[in-house]
Image: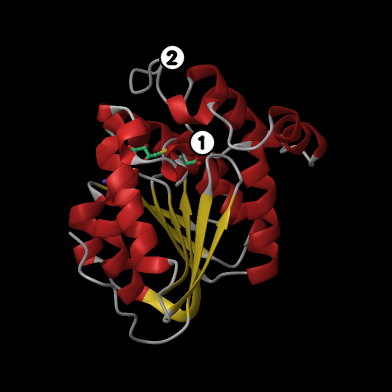
Amino acid sequence: MVESYSKNANHNMRRPVVKEEIVEFLRQRQKQVTGSLKELENFARKENIPIIPHETVAYFRFLMETIQPKNILEIGTAIGFSALLMAQHAPNAKIKTIDRNPEMISFAKENFAKFDSRKQITLLEGDAVDILSTLTGTYDFVFMDSAKSKYIVFLPEILKHLEVGGVVVLDDVFQGGDIAKDIMEVRRGQRTIYRGLQRLFEATLDNPGLTASLIPLGDGILMLRKNQAEVELPDID
Ligand SMILES: C[S@@+](CC[C@H](N)C(=O)[O-])C[C@H]1O[C@@H](n2cnc3c(N)ncnc32)[C@H](O)[C@@H]1O
């Protein structure tokens, strides 16, 4: 068993925010992954590693083929499944992906060595808090799939490196539906994440420098488009 994730981890992944039969339909009816991606998907599901669910896979396939990004940044590699998916469907993209968990890093390295056939992916090892401040270059697509309470902390640095017209996708922003509730109805252990996500929404949803869209895929996705060179984020404490 993979040490990093217990059977009780990913609690919110088992609290679908859309009717279960619709989720099942999205997962069963949309084209399945094959080959190396199927192998990694099966491994992740068996070991309870929280990779993107199939409805998000289908959406990413569509996004990659439509946008054809050139420089992708990902925060949260895990075993490398989403990075390899993006590489497959955006064959001209260079991808930098960040993770801090040594066990995940070791799986990701192995998987990139075996399956990143065009050598598109660079793995950056360490905490995104440290790595983001040393990051160079610009990106036209960013996928944030790490600790949810930190999205609002990472966002200013991400926006600095995002090209105008670039897109940020932030995964798992609905907290299994808790996000729509009053904080007093949210379990105590979940309130830091809840506050972090509420701050994220306050900073982005009505921000004139961004176009934002919330999509009920998986545990919820927030999509942001950067509309101008300088995007002001309010100081929210
Ligand atoms: C949900 S998994 C990523 C799944 C992957 N994107 C996929 O769909 O195949 C989240 C990963 O983010 C990493 N992570 C969480 N917070 C982080 C941080 N502050 N810096 C770097 N990695 C982080 C965890 O170690 C974990 O491997």
Q: Are marks 2 and 1 in contact (CB under 8 Å)?
A: no
Q: In this view, does 10 lie above or below 204?
A: above
**In the image, what residue occupies the spot 45% across and 47% down?**
173
Horizontal side of 88 relative to 127 (left or right) equals right
Mark 2 or mark 1: name the one nearer the start of the chain: 2
Q: Mark 2 points at which residue?
A: 7
Q: In which quarter of the image is the C terminus?
A: bottom left
User: Circle 1: is it few (<14), some (14-19), or many (20+) Cα within 10 Å?
Assistant: many
**In the image, what residue occupies the spot 47% across and 32% down?**
50
Q: Quadrant of residue 14?
A: top right
Horizontal side of 8 relative to 28 (left or right) equals left
Q: Is ligand 1 less than 8 Å from the beta carbon at label 1?
A: yes
Closer to the camera: disc 2 or disc 1? Answer: 2
Q: Name the residue under label 1.
A: 51
The image shows residue 152 at horizontal and vertical percentages of: 29, 58
The image shows residue 112 at horizontal and vertical percentages of: 48, 43
The residue closer to the viewer here, 36 or 28, is 28
Q: Is residue 201 at all visible to an observer of this figure? A: yes
| Callout 1: SS | loop
Q: Quadrant of the N terminus?
A: top left
Q: Is residue 5 above or below residue 140?
A: above
Q: In which quarter of the image is residue 57?
A: top right
Residue type, label 2: Lys
| Callout 2: SS | loop
